[in-house]
Image: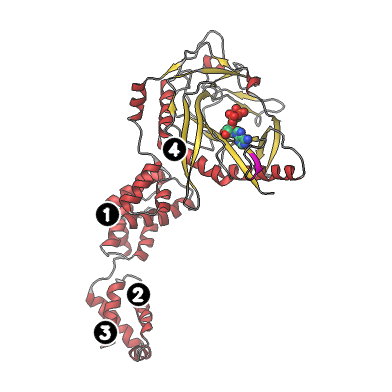
Amino acid sequence: MDWEPVIGLEIHTQLATKSKIFSGASTAYGAPPNTQACAVDLGLPGVLPVLNAAAVDMAIKFGLAIEARIAPVSVFARKNYFYPDLPKGYQISQYELPIVEHGRVVIELEDGEEKVIGVTRAHLEEDAGKSLHEDFHGMTGIDLNRAGTPLLEIVSEPDLRSAREAVAYMKKIHSLVRYLEISDGNMQEGSFRCDANVSVRPRGSKEFGTRTEIKNVNSFRFIERAINYEIERQIEILEAGGQVVQETRLYDAARNETRSMRSKEEAMDYRYFPDPDLLPLEVTAEHIERVRATLPELPDAKRHRFMEEYGLSAYDAGVLTASRELADYYEEVARLCGEAKLAANWVMGELSGFLNKENRDIADSPVSAAMLAGMLKRILDETISGKIAKEVFEAMWNGEGDADTVIEKRGLKQITDTGAIEAIIDEVISANPRQVEQYRAGKEKLIGFFVGQVMKATGGKANPAQVNALLKKKLAG
Ligand code: ADP
Ligand code: MG
């Protein structure tokens, strides 16, 4: 049978506030255990949570960016469960009335098609602490630094139809929260993690199949593998006449498989109820407009602008706008050198290649936008050829200074002096009488041979167009 996967993602993104969502404790990553947990985070009696306004603004910002409805009134609820890293015995989240509802995100598919993915809701909640097993023998340590860190949980509609689409959606949300500067999106540190709900159904069927939920995957590669594994597993069960059990599963990257963790809990298991310590959250229309005024240009708008303004293809514009930093870098290079396409080729080619090879972010590229533009200007004014430019780029990357310094120091200036080129051409002609004879007898493709000889004699520094023209003249005579 032909099976169709159905996938919905729940993404938890850590909001980049300085302090926690309901307390004044710092959210900085990497502090010694339990040094950033105050009485509120520890769940001690006699203290009350106070909502962090910055977290609310970030949620609104996200909601506006996905064209969602911002609820004029939303409610914080207690989600009750027991876990050693949850000292209060409940997590403060939003349940029936979340702050953001009914949004949409556009993803680009490989064939250039676009697809709209619905966002059911995005709600504010607090993170739990962390259990530490490694440093303790026969015991578990509890670190509550993370307890109370603000999270935005973004829940998609079950609109995704393949692992590829799921990854494209996850990348889009990742790019969006970074554009909006509401999260650093750091996946290693757990600032951006994803639960994937997966089911399959016979293609053409209207109903959804029973789903499983894969918990807490924090890499694009792993989410794709985990979903594909889960799709295969479910198809095998169904084709053997069995039934998929609704449950929570864990992805084991080392073995590339998912394993059952626990049977799926139902909402009623959590005994949700409005938190009596917190007032309903009211957001006025003026408040929303104030936040709207802080929205930057968003990735989709930027991509379309790059296509129009710089004449880039959809693909190139997509690559260059994947992150705000890369887009800014590109625009500066394009502006400074005045040739948008040349700038795109170098940013996507040489620069990205070097960044990838050394696994560096654009922010710590040793070649700044100004330096790259300075070099491109030397290509444009024919001081160097595109080929020599690669050598110049590598030298700049390795700290030898800007393009002019490198060109000067290494003697890479293109030879454009007609007299100098002619002298070399004369030498080449007299050194190769047989080829000259053949050329004059009609074997014109030998021009390539002569150009090669001249370029070799000049260490690649002669201006190729000039060499060509001068050679033709001399060989004709
Ligand atoms: P829960 O509260 O149990 O996590 P929700 O109804 O809020 O469940 O859905 C959570 C996620 O699961 C959403 O992203 C939703 O799109 C997705 N989902 C719901 N039903 C299915 C299904 N049958 N197959 C795949 N994904 C599903
Ligand atoms: Mg869930």
Residue at (44, 38) in percent of width and height = 176
Give SS at disc 4.
helix
Pointer 2 local density, CA inside 10 Å: few below 14, some 14–19, many at least 20 = some
- Please state which of the two labelled residues, at mark 3 or mark 2, is closer to the viewer: 3
Q: Are marks 2 and 1 in contact (CB under 8 Å)?
A: no
Q: Report the residue marked by disc 4.
A: 176
Estimate the spatial distance between the alpha carbons at disc 3 and disc 1, rounded to whole Å: 36 Å
Q: Which label sits on residue 455? A: 2
Horizontal side of 172 relative to 84 (left or right) equals left
Give the amino acid at mark 1. Answer: Gly
Could you say where residue 185 lies in the image, as x and y percent from the top left? 48, 36
**Residue 197 in sight here:** no
Residue toward you, 120 or 316: 120
The picture quadrant for ligand 1 comes to top right
Could you say where residue 297 lies in the image, as x and y percent from the top left? 35, 39
Image quadrant occupied by the C terminus: bottom left
Query: Which residue lies most toward the top here?
Result: 46
Q: Are marks 3 and 1 in contact (CB under 8 Å)?
A: no
Q: Earlier in the sequence, mark 2 or mark 1?
A: 1
Q: Earlier in the sequence, mark 3 or mark 2?
A: 2
Q: Report the residue marked by disc 1.
A: 338
Could you say where residue 86 lies in the image, as x and y percent from the top left? 60, 20
Q: Are marks 3 and 4 in contact (CB under 8 Å)?
A: no
Q: Report the residue marked by disc 3.
A: 474
Estimate the spatial distance between the alpha carbons at disc 4 and disc 2, rounded to whole Å: 48 Å
Magenta region: which residues? 199-203
